[in-house]
Amino acid sequence: VDAEVVVEPWTHFFDAYLGPLADAGSDTPDAIVPSPLMPHLMADWVAARAAARWPRRTVRVVPLPAAPAVPWERAGDDGTHYVSFAEWMCPINCIEPARCPHTRGPRSWSMPDAVAAHVASEMAAGRPIAAAPVFHCLHRAFGVGMIDVQAVLDADRQVAEVLAKEGGDVLVGTVSHCHGAIRRLRIDDAVGERLT
């Protein structure tokens, strides 16, 4: 397989890589292997695409009104909320198997389900979320975690369609079974008015 090494800031790379795929309406089998310590880059990309799509609208990060119901959660300085089912230090090479290597019991949890439950709870509390794309990092070949590029492109399309006529909140999550980062974006109406 041919490979190309590209060295540049993450945001520049994803703009150049994902943007043309999204603009062309492409379908792709590609995957992103996230760094364990990278920022919430997919949420950044979705927000940047919304801001470019709607220059008269404000796209901003807002704090979560309520924390997800998971054993460990913390708000970061940039508005990203970090969540985990682990209250212990996980092995760096854990592939989140069906049997947890720490508890030695079955892994009965999955963060995508927890995020879906959080969205349902927010809706029931009268804090609507117009779209809630979740990028699920799954361990594939040799335990390497990957996010489907198609999920990121689909999220961009979903935001474009759902919020085309009026503002709303979008909850963006990048999660594995055990851990995750979620961010709530608020996309306002154009100049305080409904779009037609």
Image (tube, grey):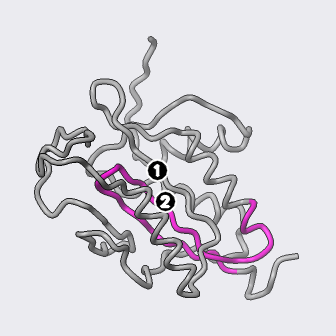
Q: Is the C-beta separation of discs 1 and 2 under 8 Å?
A: yes
Going from N to C along the chain, the mark reached first, 1 or 2, is 1
Seen at 60% across and 79% down, the residue is 128
Q: Which residue is mark 2?
A: 44
Q: Is residue 105 magenta?
A: no
What number is the disc on residue 11?
1
Q: Which residues are magenta?
A: 161-188
Seen at 31% across and 32% down, the residue is 144
Q: Amino acid at mark 1?
A: Thr
Instruction: Please provide percent x and percent y for residue 88.
Output: 11, 59
Magenta segment main secondary structure? strand
Q: Quadrant of the C terminus?
A: bottom right
In-image side of 5 versus 88 (left or right): right
Q: Nearer the viewer, mark 1 or mark 2?
A: 2
Element type where label 1 sits in the image: helix
Mark 2 neighbour class, 10 Å CA radius: few under 14, some 14 to 19, many 20 or more: some
Figure check: 21 above or below 100: above
In-image side of 9 versus 123 (left or right): left
Seen at 16% across and 48% down, the residue is 105
Figure check: 161 above or below 144: below
Instruction: Please provide percent x and percent y for residue 195.
Output: 82, 77
User: Nearest the camera: 147 or 128?
Assistant: 128
Seen at 40% across and 46% down, the residue is 9
